[in-house]
Amino acid sequence: MTNCAGVIAIDQYLAHPPAHVWRTLTDPELLARWLMPNDFAPVVGHRFTFHTKPRPDLGFDGTVHCEVLELTPERLLRLAWRGGRLDSTVTWTLRPEGKGTRLFLEHAGFDTDDPAQLHAYTAMGGGWHSIMTRALDRMLLAPSG
Amino acid sequence: MADVDVFAAVASPVRRQVLSLLRDGGSRPVQELADHFDMRRPSLSEHLRVLKDAGLVVERRSGRQRLYTLRAEPLREVADWLHPYERFWREKLANLRDLLDGES
C-alpha cells in the first residue's frame, strides 16, 4: 500500500527462506530475471545501473543509476535510485515468517508535485495505460485544464 | 464541492468510456456521446450526472445543446492512491514470486 504521497510501501509473503530471497535480490543474474538487467554487486558504496526502455519523450533515458547504501545479509538492502529527475531510495527488508519470508519494499523520495517526476514514474512503470494516467498526463501537460 | 467519490465515479465501465471519449475529443454534446452507447439517453444522463457530481466533467450550455468537457484534476486522487511506480513494483514482485516458485 502507498502510505502517503511520496512513499510506496508494499510487502509480499514468499514461501521461501530468507537466504533464497536474499539471493534473488543480490545475484545480478537472478535480479535481471525478475527486475531489470544490471551490474549490481553486494558491496556498500558500489555504484551500478539498471536498464529498461528509454522514454526520451519523458526525459528518461532508460537508465536507473543506483548505489548500495546499506546492506545486512538476509535482512536489509537499501539502494539509491536515480533516473530522469527522480532521486529516491529503495529499501528491501526481509523478515522470516513461518517457513517463508515476508519481503517489505519501501520506495521513498517521490515528489508528487513535480509533473516531470510523475512522468518518470509512468515511464518506469512501463505501460500503466489506464485512462487515469492518460487523463493525468493530459492535465499535467495542459495545467490550465 | 464534489459529493460523489471519484473512485465510485470511475468504477463504471460506461463512465470510464465517457471519460475516454471526452479525453480524445474535447467537449462533446450529450447526443454525440449517446451515439456511442446502446442505452436510453436518460440512463446516459444519469451517468453524466454522477461524473459531474464527482467533478470529473463540466457541463455547459451552448444554445440548445449541453456540452460536456473532461476535468481531470480529481483523478490525481486516484493516481496518488495507485501510483504508477506502485504498479511497477507489484508486477516485479509477482515476477520475483514466480522466479522463486519456479526454482524450488
Image (cartoon, coloured by chain):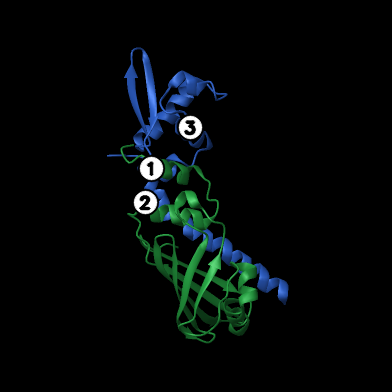
Chain colours: A green, B blue
Return the chain for callout 2: A
Secondary structure of residue under mark 2: helix
Q: Residues within 10 Å of mark 2 (few under 14, many from 20)?
A: some
Residues under labels 3 and 2: Cα distance? 21 Å
- Residue marked by disc 1: A141
Q: What residue type is labelled 2?
A: Pro
Of badges 3 and 2, nearer the viewer stands 2
Contact flag, marks 3 and 2 (Cβ < 8 Å) = no
Q: Which amino acid does label 1 sit on?
A: Leu
| Residue A141 found in image quarter | top left
Q: Which of B66 and B46 is in front in this view?
A: B66
In whole angstroms, how far apart are the C-alphas of marks 1 and 3? 14 Å
Residue A50, position as x, y percentages in the image: 54, 68
Q: What residue type is labelled 3?
A: Asp
Dot 3: few (<14), some (14–19), or many (≥20) neighbours within 10 Å? few
| Circle 1 crowding by C-alpha within 10 Å: few under 14, some 14–19, many from 20 | few
Q: Which mark is residue A8?
A: none
The numbered mark, 2 or 1, whose residue comes first in the sequence reads 2
Chain ID, mark 1: A
Q: Is residue A116 left or right of residue A130?
A: left
Q: Which residue is drawn at 44% across and 54% down?
A: A59
Residue matched to label 2: A115
- The nearer-to-camera label among 1 and 3 is 1
Alpha carbon separation for disc pair 2 and 1? 8 Å
Q: Look at mark 3 in the image and give the residue it sits on.
A: B24
Tag count in the figure?
Answer: 3
